[in-house]
Amino acid sequence: SADRLDVSWRAKASQKPEMDLLASVDNRTLVTIADGLIHTDCWLTYGVLRGKLAQAQIVVPAGHRILDINSDASIRSWKPTDANGHQVVDIELVSPSDKPVTFEVHTQRKLPDEGFDVIGMNEGAPSAGIHALDAVRESGQVVVRHAKELSLNVASQSGLIRIEQSAVDPRLAGENDLAFKFYSQAVKLGLDVQPVEPRLTATHNIEVIFTEDELQSRSSINYAIERAGVFELRLKVPDDFTVDHVQCGGMKEYNVDEQTRVLTISLHERTQGAVEVRVSGTRRLSDDNMQDEQQLPLLEPLNLVRETGSVLVFAKEAIEVITNRDDLVGAQPLPTGPQSRGEARLASAWSFTKRPLTIPVSTIRKPTRISVEVASTIDVQPEVTDIRHVVDFLVEYAGTDIFQIDVPEAVSDRIEIEVAEGSSTAIKQKTAEEPIDGWVPWTIVMQREVVGHQQFVITWQETSNGEDEVEADDAPAEATEEAEETDATPATVYSLVRPWGLINEDGEEVTPLVKIYGEIAIKKERSLSLNSSAEGESVEPIDIREFRLLPADGMQGYRYFKLVGDSGTPTVSISRERHEIQEVVATVVSRALVEVVTDEDAEVTYRCRLRVKSTERQRLQINLPVEMQVLGTFVNNREVKLAKAKDEERVDTLLEPYWINVARTTSSDEPFLITVQFLWKLNPPLGQSQFGAGRIDLPLPVLGTASGQAAVQELRVVSWVPNEYLLVGDPKNFELQKVRRYLADVVLGSRPDPDVDEMASWVQEGCSHSTDFMNFPTNGRQAYVYTNLGGASLIRIKWWHRLTMTLILSGAVALIGLILIGTPWENKLGILLLAGFGAVLYGVQDSHSLYCGMEVAQYGLIALLGLWVLHGVFGWFRTANSKNGNPAAQAAASGPQNPLTAPPVVPPPGSFDDPWKFGK
């Protein structure tokens, strides 16, 4: 038995009245067209107005494949059935709901070739979209989205209103879409979808180049691909044209269909935007089709909306291109400036804006045209004569690889024929033929045909005839006069080379030279005196400044012209005399600067800089003070080492010879700077003297040997001494640099000019120089600058110790003033005037010594004048008191009486009347 029984029950009928379902539907449909399919996503939201929603029916167009149906409520099952030309899907929920329910339906179908509808369920017609059945009202939004490679057009529209993107449901929003809203199922939206066709435009620039054996074509095509990308580009290739090379960014491969003559360029990926294609090819030319008319091989890009471009026709000078303007199609003349492509020059230029494009041309080969210029130099030396010819052939139009030049038979066995520097074509073979009338034809075969300039250098030497030379200084006067009167000195005749045009196998000139122009320069060695003359057709003397082929150098110049039909080759006749040459100095020191720093410790620091111009290319001898210590040696900015030379080359007992390396890359005409820094012991040192004055001997560097010293144009010596010392006067062969004299300097002397700021730039002008090896200790010292013309190996300078000389001279002047203090003013002023006159006379000879003397004696002069003035003032006071009757003042004014010079005492009258009284 059971203690309890639980029973669940359910009333068969509700107490509430049963009412039918009443609902409205909000339809959100997204149609996406891409990849050949139509994807439809629909959100149907049921709003329950009455009753409960337990099941629903939706309509799906026939042909749609239902992918899935979802809902925010639990779905028990859904099942589609075909009815009335569409599909009806029955959806059953797990439990009825009186709240809004959303069904999400996803379908897809194949994109039809023709137009189609995407929404609408009209009465009597199958449904075109996804809709709800048995709904009171259905409204919503429909959005159509398509891929970029498709173009979408609305074929028909009914019951729909276009809305903006801001009003679109977020679930439907996106890019590239059309949005509509509707308020009933009786709507219609018909669409027409077509793939987007790419739009291609191009700028096509073509260059056609005619050469001797082929026609070259270079096409540069700049595509602009719009709307849609492409995977390949196609071009029509002309007949009898070979594609040699194709360049294109992103190109996978290219091939030419020989049947259709279409060039297909395959790309790695779909490409859109700017694409540049370069195609080059050739067409073989022969002598037969060169004369025939032909159309230029112009590539034609296919599938273009618009094509513009230009055609530039280039040809070598040997080929003349003629355009048949009567058969010209689609091309207009294009104004442009001169252009060239290698050796080919611009023959014609055309522009076009449409197809078809036809440019018929014919070509004519021009014959070879040769002209020549000859630059001849005859350099007469004492023993030999160097002859040099530069033969410059100018080959125009058609090229040639054979040149012929005649040379005199007498020198044919020793000539040298070379290609001039800068020529790109080398000589293959040189052959001398049998002499003809004193001339030897030389045939020169090149490695390839030459068009343009081809230069040859032909040189040989001729020995001088001993009878031709007359020593002008050694020849007797009678012989000289006889030679002048009879012209006995024989002249040497030099024949020039003779170039030819094209010669055939029979020796005939089939292509004569169009023009010959030549220049002749006569040069000589300095010891020779020449008289020259030239003979030949159209030869004339000219000034060497009129040379066009040769540099303006030499003693005499000629030029000649030889046109077609002229005969004769110019010859030059030269007679000469030889003179002795005066030797010149090989080394010149234009500027020399020697800086010396002295001190009381006998250690002297030298810095010597020499601005030198020398023909010596290896080494020079430099003589430096004995027992010096080298700190650094430089040639320009390069440090070198000194090498000891032999004592036999010594130029002075105070100097030792050394070799300095002056090897350099510059020419001998360019100056260079020699810098030497060293230490030296001064003996006796500065300041070693008993009376505060002395002399220092400073040896100076000398360039050159004992047998030939270098010429020195200007030498400057800067001596730095402590401020306690004075350098006095002008040393022998030197002049002290002084400040410009004023009127006071006539009496007081000229003071030295210590300005040395411009010394370095003065000696280093025009030379590269090194940084100073060591700094000069010039603080607390005064500079004295001495100048010499012609050079010197020693400078002797007098010095004074400033304090000692001041005590001596100032004390002496003060003592003299004290001795003369009692003399009348006439004596004092006279002595001063005589002393000043003597100082002026001495200053004419040595104004700086006068300045130094006045400087050290100035304190004594002040004391002298002070003593004299004080004595004069007090004497005036004593004289004034004696005039006022003061005996003491008078006695004081008269001063002490000297018994030898005192005036006699006269007794009063009557003192000697009584002798006895006087005796008492």
Image (tube, helix red, strand yellow):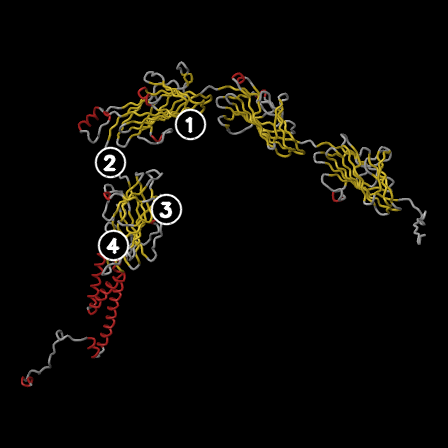
Nearer the observer: mark 2 or 4; the answer is 4
Q: CA distance from mark 1 to mark 2?
A: 43 Å
| Contact, mark 4 vs mark 3 (Cβ under 8 Å) | no
Figure disc tally: 4
Residue 920 in view here = yes
Q: Which residue is mark 1?
A: 423
Query: Which image quadrant for residue 657?
Result: top left
Q: Residues within 10 Å of mark 3 (few under 14, many from 20)?
A: some
Residue type at numbered disc 4 = Asn
Q: Residues within 10 Å of mark 1 (few under 14, many from 20)?
A: few
Above-or-below relation of 458 to 88: above
Per the rendering, the mark at residue 770 is 3
Above-or-below relation of 392 to 807: above
- Numbered disc 2: secondary structure: loop
Q: Residue furthest left?
A: 916
| Contact, mark 1 vs mark 3 (Cβ under 8 Å) | no
Whether residue 525 sits left or right of residue 208 in the image: it is left
Nearer the observer: mark 1 or 3; the answer is 3
| Front one among 747 and 824 | 747
Residue 902 drawn at (x, y percent) = 14, 75
Per the rendering, the mark at residue 683 is 4
Which one is earlier in the sequence, the residue at label 2 or at label 4? 2
Q: Which residue is mark 2?
A: 582
Residue type at numbered disc 1 = Ser
